Amino acid sequence: MTDAEELRSLTRQLLADHPPATTDRTDFLRARFDAGLAWVHYPVGLGGLDAPRALQAVVDTELAAAGAPDNDPRRIGIGLGMAAPTLLAYGSDEVKRRFLRPLWVGEEVWCQLFSEPGAGSDLAALGTRAVRDGGDWVVDGQKVWTSSAHVARWAILIARTDPDVPKHRGITYFVCDMTDPGVEVRPLRQITGEAEFNEVFLTGVRIPDAHRLGETGDGWRVAQTTLMNERVSIGGARIPREGGMIGKAATTWRERPELRTHDLHRRLLDLWVDAEVARLTGERLRQQLVAGQPGPEGSAMKLGFARLNQAISGLEVELLGEEGLLYGEWEMRRPELVDFTGRDAGYRYLRSKGNSIEGGTTEVLLNIVAERVLGLPSEPRNDKDVAWKDLSR
Amino acid sequence: MTERTAQSDLLYSETEDDLRAAVRSLLTDRAGHQELLGRIESDSPYVPGLWKALAGDMGAAGLLVPEKLGGQGASHREAAVVLEELGRAVTPAPYLTSAVVATETLLALAGESTPAAELLSGLASGRTVAVLAVPLSASPYAEPSERSTASTVTGVADAGAADVLLVSRADGLYAVPAGEATVEPQIPLDLTRPLARVTTEAGSGTLLAGPDAAAAAIRRGLLAGAGLLASEQLGLAEWCLEETVRHTRERHQFNRPVGSFQALKHRMAQLWLDVVGARAAARAAADALATGSPDAPLTVAVAQAYCSKVAVRAAEECVQLHGGIGMTWEHPAHIALKRAKSDQLALGSAGRHQDAIAALVDLPAPA
Ligand SMILES: Cc1cc2nc3c(=O)[nH]c(=O)nc-3n(C[C@H](O)[C@H](O)[C@H](O)COP(=O)(O)OP(=O)(O)OC[C@H]3O[C@@H](n4cnc5c(N)ncnc54)[C@H](O)[C@@H]3O)c2cc1C
């Protein structure tokens, strides 16, 4: 087992061999991965050292102090937060070796081909077909609301491989090559004016069987790993006091005394307290993880984050009064980054509306808390024992 | 004692878990809700013998007091755990008033004042109950000049159970034996935390400290009280949620458990989220007080502003989701509601704490 002292000296060695000031950013990140200092809890040879997860902080602190480049987790959010843990849990050795390094370094961006026009919250109802053809699978169907598909090199994909069994059982999980000629990505303009997500049409896309994750028909279970990690990664980042959305509103309040009213003051303080409590809740969650006693608080983070972002950005627009009536620009762009806090208050207000939809809607997550955490009875169901092909659509 | 890092520790230690288990089992055996419902209209809601078992035998009253003054030398973190359990059971016990507010006030004076130190050892052992003679609603932020120095103070919590009253006068803080004071019970909203009108005569009692030291000590007592009240509120909210989940799983209407209706499930899930936040906030306050962090005033204010709302919401949801039975005197939901509502006003309202936050983090009110 690797301890803190050893990690610190390995990190210093890395910095000595590849001085950040004179080393190319990508080269540095590759060297960091190869030294096992990318995610220390990952296996040796895959960017880690089989060390306790908590010790990542030791590495990060040393690197930050030395001004080393980081791998911009914002840009590679889906890859880091969702694809990587799924690849690690279900990929063959060859798959892990092929994908994890460029994923972590950020050379290859990932997207998530899960949702379909007819299957969002009811994800297991999906209809995209994958049919076995020799050593390949041939995929046909349509995905939608796919963030970053226009910049992604790879995708995690779930498709139906057996329509004759109930919906959860006939799904298989794949890694899809976004450069395959059968993949067509069309921008889908959203509420903010820009196109951060897309429609993706899959026509005769060929996926080698080696790019299947988990057993044929077991894709729903594999997808659970992805979805669990998605919820923790959205809203799970460590932030300082007044980090995130509340910092923007507080700064405006301090700098613009002429905008202050008593009503806004009360509401701002309410939200300030809520944001501080959300920060402490996240801190408590991290301490639980480090102590090896993970609690269900993880589900609280994404829900709280969505509600807070919406409330704070809404207040910000009101606070700005006359200026709140204006909007930066509506020009249709295809941004490379998903950016919740960027641009102006109007943008933040509109973008935050997606926070309670993406990665599982607030309603669906509240169901999960009620049933899995509180043990309340589940909804009556009429789709459990019916073959997918016989479900009404 | 484990080494403490600058980062606040928001978890519970093993010692704290053990303490919780011991307090919970005592309260379940001796001060269950049925016992309480039978006592709340009697002359005294306090369960006989409970204070001795909790404060004396278990040492809970002396948690904040250093060993050299006869206490346990523990900290606000452990006292917070006791308060979570007292809140969960809505126990009538002068713990917050005597073992926290009065104790903390005296701790501020113990260095210089021999009478204060002596009084403390009595409090720590649980033999003596002392109560600071201020209204339960007194906030830590009030200037001493605003604070009542009249001979009569109303709304003093647990005064009827006190052996000693700590009375603030213009020339300082006095310890007045209960026998030399007039204590007239008032009818409280929260039947489990009795209130009284306390009258003392000028010149009675022993002088503990002059006006400046007294003002600082009282502020410290009230701040610690407010910070740890958050833990009482957390425990109460937790009980309300658990009880509501249990009830709605068992209660059937329309041929289904009412807890399977999504409208209710979402309300309870939301409440769970609030309780998760309340736990983080209350722990942060207890830890900041325990470590004497410079962040303590802000952390306490955040915990109060948040937890008092959560406790009231939890108790109100508990009554509503129990339906008719929730409105009955026989069901304990009302004792929780009364405690939660009264806690909302205790030791500074949420609004007062928010005003304090505004000043501390530089978010000033409009001119
Ligand atoms: C900004 C953004 C980015 C996204 N990025 C991606 C991506 O990269 N990849 C991807 O695969 N998907 C992505 N999505 C899609 C997202 O996961 C789905 O939109 C989401 O799961 C909801 O599905 P839906 O849109 O079909 O809504 P529906 O499922 O049709 O829901 C409609 C309404 O009904 C409610 N509802 C549904 N079921 C229940 C229930 N059981 N109980 C109570 N209420 C219910 C919902 O909460 C919602 O309010 C993204 C979405 C957004 C907004």
Image (tube, coloured by chain):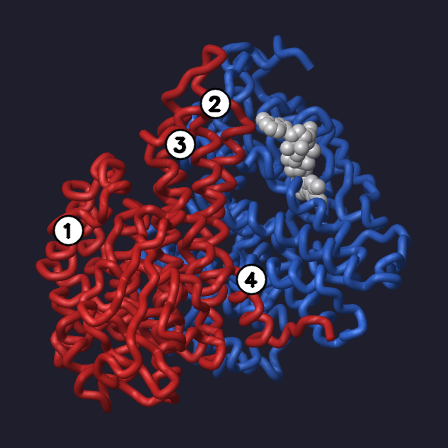
The residue to which callout 3 is attached is B245
- Which one of the lettered chains is coloured blue? A
Q: Quadrant of ligand 1?
A: top right
Query: In the image shown, does A313 or B242 lie closer to the viewer?
Result: B242
- Number of callouts in the render? 4
Residue shown at 70%/50% (left/top)?
A: A352
Q: Chain of mark 4?
A: B
Residue shown at 11%/54% (left/top)?
A: B53
Query: In the image shown, does B37 or A64 lie closer to the viewer?
Result: B37
Q: Chain of mark 2?
A: B
The residue to which callout 4 is attached is B351
Three-letter code, disc 4: Gly
- Which one of the lettered chains is coloured red? B
The residue to which callout 1 is attached is B50
At mark 3, the secondary structure is: helix
The residue to which callout 2 is attached is B260
Which quadrant of the figure contains the C terminus of chain B? bottom right
At mark 2, the secondary structure is: helix
The quarter holding residue B331 reads top left
The quarter holding residue A116 reads top right
For the residue carrying disc 2, how many other residues have a C-alpha within 10 Å: few (<14), some (14-19), or many (20+)?
some
